[in-house]
Amino acid sequence: MGHDPVYLTRRGRRVAAVIDADDLEALIAAAENLADIEAAKAARAEVADGEATIPWEQIKADLGLS
């Protein structure tokens, strides 16, 4: 991300920003990766707390892959 954003203001307060499209794509990818990491942490915590897991064969059957 090497481009500076351009801020749009109203009465001296920032209300929006215009950013490079590639920078936006990188930010979206980073946010999605962070959400995946958080979901994985939560799943591991559930397993550690004794939550029942779903067998792989059941997942495949539910998705029509078996």
Image: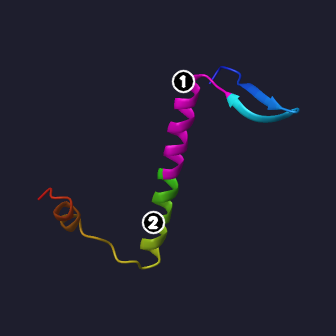
Which of the numbered marks, if any, corresponds to residue 44? 2
User: What colour scheme governs how the chains and residues are painted in the rendered image of this protein?
Assistant: rainbow
Q: Is residue 4 above or below residue 63?
A: above
In magenta stretch: residue 5:
no
Is 24 left or right of 59, judged from the image as shown?
Answer: right
Q: Residue furthest right?
A: 12
Tag 1: amino acid: Asp
Q: Is residue 49 above or below residue 12?
A: below
Q: Residue furthest front?
A: 11
Going from the N terminus, do you reach mark 1 or mark 2 first? Answer: 1
Q: In x, y percent, where is residue 49?
A: 47, 78
Q: In x, y percent, where is residue 61?
A: 16, 64
Q: Is residue 35 above or below residue 30?
A: below
Q: In x, y percent, where is residue 40?
A: 45, 58
> Residue at the spot x=49%, y=44% of the render?
33
Task: Point out the frontmost of discs 1 and 2.
Answer: 1
Location of residue 64 by image quarter: bottom left
Q: Residue furthest left?
A: 66
Residue range highlighted in magenta: 18-35
**CA separation in Å, label 1 and label 2:** 33 Å
Please identify the quadrant where the C terminus is shown.
bottom left
Prevailing secondary structure class for the magenta stretch in the rendered image? helix
Q: Which residue is mark 1?
A: 22
- State the SS at label 2: helix
> Residue at the spot x=65%, y=20% of the render?
2
Q: Is mark 1 in CB contact (under 8 Å) with mark 2? A: no
